[in-house]
Amino acid sequence: MQKNKLFSLLLAIVMLFSQNVFAEESVKTPQQQQAQVQEYSNYMQKKIVQVYAHNIANNYYYGIEDEELLFAVICDMIDKGKFDINSVIESMLGALKDDYSEFYTPEEYKAMTEDVSGEFSGIGITITDNPNGVLVLSVIEGGPAYKAGVLANDYIVGVNGQSVIGMNSAQVRELVVGAIGTEVKIRVLRGKEELELTCVRDVVEVSQIETEMVNDETAYIKLLQFTSNSPKEMETLVKELRSKSVDNVILDLRDNPGGDLNAAIDMANIFISAGKIAELRYKDETKNTFLYSENFHAPNFDLVVLVNEHSASASEFLAMAIQSRNAGKILGTKTYGKGSMQVLNRAVNGAGFKYTIGEFYSYKGQRINTIGVNPDIEVENLVLSVNEDEFQKIDFEKIPEGNIDGEMTLALEQRLAALGYMKEADETFDDTTKDAVSRLQAVLGFQITGVPEIGLYMFLNDYDYSQLNKVIDLQMEAAIKHLR
């Protein structure tokens, strides 16, 4: 009975206390309530900043203290006179002095995390950051950009009338992608000439692998970029080549900017037999990890891997792994030298940021970052100025013959090849020629028929080709010769 009385008394005290609290809460003015909310908001902001600073300092490969990051935040807030979470994160990344640490707006972060190995609504180009601006690495054949006349090695300088000079590739991509069926105007710099091309956004089926047979025994595989779906696509292709008893493979990683490192690791498992392939190193050395191939049935290809100064990151990982295990010969020029690994984080407001958490080494301890992969066989391509005097002369009285093979077709194709719309001239007016004509007609604003008319021939005749270069692919020739 006494216990029940004691419990009742305690309950009454609690209820009385609660009533007093709620009574006190109820008499707070709106200004007091707003101040309380602001106080809580300030507390949460402070905790968020502390968490970000601690996590970055804890994992940043090259070492930094929490206090240094927090000092950068304080300086930023004093400079701007306010707290802004985006600006806070950027100030911390700036303190890292790391070329590969980067901040992304919510829109940029969303674009970064899309699975581009499937389908997306865009214009069908692969772009990368370059000292001279955002560079078009490749154009998906048949895609909106391809139809509009965008070419590999164009620099994007404007989107929908807005200058993008100074922007990175993620920011440009955000402006380019959009709803299916809508138009986007891309301004490109090609040589010394600026062109504005209109692309109609569409669903683009993305394949990062191009392949063709050099001869019955030799397959050529061009890997444009490493995405999450690339290994599966490559595995299917390798099985097909083995079923055809292909002996030789040329794997082209030139101009491949990298991408998903896990995809490169999986790709190494396809070409390299069981055993160590690489080492991942972190700030906390206890986390250092050796990577292994578990493939006991790797294809016994004679493999040549083509690389150049634009082969970076995941491309360098695969080239390094193949080279260190003697699974193939690396041919070309020294690679870019990005052997570091970044982690991508999402901020509370939907933005994102990445910073360097480690580097990859060969399993023998060879460092790649800032050094690159040196080829086993060094070969440079030959770059020559286009000599218009070598072209077949355009005879305007014979223009109708331009689409029925012969001299005028040769004159047409030589100029289209010099401008980058086709690979080489062969005097045969086929679907490749018609496609190249259609793309140039799109650029010039002509009716797209695929059949050359006098206006197109006049443009080709008057164009100044002296500013253009042509590349003689000695690396490809050397690869074929080596395999022979």
Image (cartoon, rainbow, N blue to C red):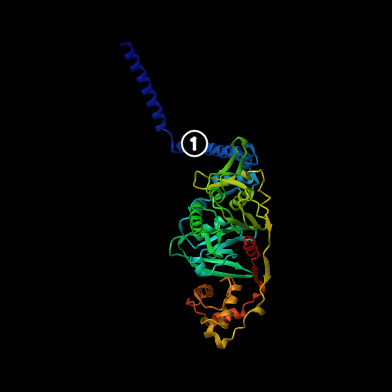
Q: Position of residue 421 (x, y in %)?
A: 56, 71
The image quarter containing residue 398 is bottom right
Instruction: Name the residue furthest top.
Output: 2
Residue behind mark 1: 40
SS at badge 1: helix
Closer to the camera in the image, 274 or 441: 274
Which three-letter amino acid code belongs to the residue tagged 1?
Tyr
* On screen, residue 220 above or below 410: above
* On screen, residue 464 above or below 246: below
Closer to the camera in the image, 357 or 183: 357
Q: Quadrant of the N terminus?
A: top left
Closer to the camera in the image, 217 or 419: 217
Q: Position of residue 369 (x, y in %)?
A: 66, 48
Q: Position of residue 357 (x, y in %)?
A: 60, 42
Residue 384: in sight, yes or no?
yes
The image quarter containing residue 472 is bottom right
Mark 1 closeness class: few <14, some 14–19, many ≥20 residues within 10 Å = few
Q: Quadrant of the C terminus?
A: bottom right
